[in-house]
Image (cartoon, helix red, strand yellow):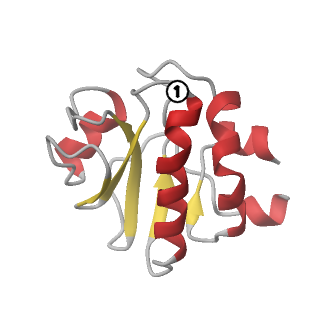
Amino acid sequence: MEDKKKGRITPRWIDSLKENEIFVFGSNLAGMHGGGAARIARLHFGAIMGKGVGLQGQSYAIPTMQGGVETIRPYVDDFIAYAKHHQELHFLVTPIGCGIAGFEAEDIAPLFESAKELKNISLPESFWEVIE
């Protein structure tokens, strides 16, 4: 597994992106990007107030505030499918759901199991610890 994650651990703090990098953050369906990584996405990486899902600027929103883990799964699946079709981009997944939404890495990381196979998705160390 070490080979799969080599070079694919999201930095703990992101304040700039390369041209082909996308900041992946947890959002709410209403797109009210007021706190946590969502606020950083809005202030620095083009997230749009009122847009709670998908690509916006150099960021990608995955809703995490609408219920349990099973309500997040379809959005993670859509994200992974998007990343699979956009190999020219590198997606830096933050620990979505593990801040304001109140989940633990053990809850969210398994949703990213299939992302292990995609070289253009980086995951937080805490997610790798769960899925490897």
Q: Is mark 1 on a helix, strand or loop?
A: loop
34 left or right of 129 in image: left
Q: Residue at x 24, y 53 (%)?
A: 45
Measured from the top left, where is residue 77 in percent x and y? 55, 55
Q: Residue furthest left?
A: 49
- Residue 5 in picture, x, y percent from top left: 73, 59
Of residues 14 and 28, the one drawn nearer to the viewer in this rendering: 28
In the picture, measured across the screen, residue 115 lies left or right of residue 67, that is right
Judging depth in this view, the residue of 125 and 78 nearest the camera is: 78
Residue nearest the observer in this picture, 1 or 69: 69
Residue 84 in the image: state x and y as whole percent.
Answer: 55, 73
Snapshot quadrant of residue 126: top right
Density class for disc 1 (Cα within 10 Å; few <14, some 14-19, many ≥20) is some
- Amino acid type, label 1: Cys
Tell me which residue sits at (77%, 39%) in the image.
129
Q: In this view, does 17 lie above or below 40?
A: below
Image position of 52 with respect to 117: above or below:
above
In the rendered image, which residue does mark 1 sit on? 98
